[in-house]
Image: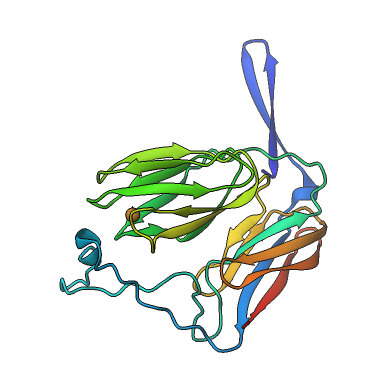
Amino acid sequence: MNVRSFKLKAGSLLMVLAITQSAWAGGGVKATAKFDGKRPKRSVIKMDADQYCATANKKKDGSPKKVGSEQAIVSKSGMVKNVIVYVKDGLGDAKFDTPAEQAELNQQGCMYKPHVLSLQTGQPMLIKNSDSTLHNIHSFAEKQRGFNFAQPKKGDEKEVKFARPEIVKVKCDVHPWMSAHIGVFDHPFHAVTGKKGTCDINDLPAGEYTLVAWHETFGEMEQKVTVADGAAVEVEFVFKAK
Ligand SMILES: [Cu+2]
């Protein structure tokens, strides 16, 4: 996105000129999400109600593998996973190209993988079933038409797109423990924290922004940040125990 291409026709020659805009030179945000308070315990998901799911997650030696809830994952050092960090204000009327890169939401071991992701409006997202059992994918959207369809077989795939920015929840009506959240934004300045509680937002032009950190259980908070040309700003969000 820091390179804008212009196509010029010179006789039969097609010339492609790439012009780098210096205003977009590699500024960014390095975000950290922490938790202040008693670390929540991860509950073990009971999949016994479904014969397939009950044995779908195995260790290497074939013994049953416990699967923990993903709704509040805090590391021993207090870092929070699955926080969506995004630019809420400061981009003005700028329009951004839609990434062609396909995001993916997999159903595997009767869990959504990943549990939280973020993408851009219009960006394709592949929903696929890697399990030999029926799942359905039911979206809960407020600002756009939702979807609700079944994927009965392993290998089933369907591509979806989101037209409007919002954080969309997805659930499986067959397996009540299965849920995921998809952050949809009309710009590319969003990311999700990994297990170390960090994520990067890259190529932000210099300017002042309002950032939001959103977590499905811990809520959301805002922070103002000033990004200088070519510099990465470190931003820390601290979620407090309620
Ligand atoms: Cu399911």
**Rendered location of residue 153, percent (x, y):** 25, 44
Residue at point 68%, 74% (across, down): 237
The residue positioned farthest toward the top in the image shown:
11
Count of marks overlaid on the render: 0
Q: Quadrant of the N terminus?
A: top right
Q: Quadrant of residue 12?
A: top right
Residue at point 66%, 57% (across, down): 202
Q: Please tell me which residue lies in front, 9 or 176.
A: 176
**Rendered location of residue 206, percent (x, y):** 81, 56
Please say if 156 is above or below 25. above
**Rendered location of residue 69, percent (x, y):** 41, 72
**Rendered location of residue 194, percent (x, y):** 51, 68
Please say if 16 is above or below 199. above
Q: Quadrant of the C terminus?
A: bottom right
Q: Please tell me which residue lies in front, 207 or 43.
A: 43
Residue at point 53%, 66% (across, down): 82
Q: Is residue 219 left or right of residue 222?
A: left
Q: Please tell me which residue lies in front, 48 or 226.
A: 48
In what quadrant does ligand 1 lie? bottom left
The residue positioned farthest toward the bottom in the image shown:
38
Q: Is residue 6 left or right of residue 116?
A: right
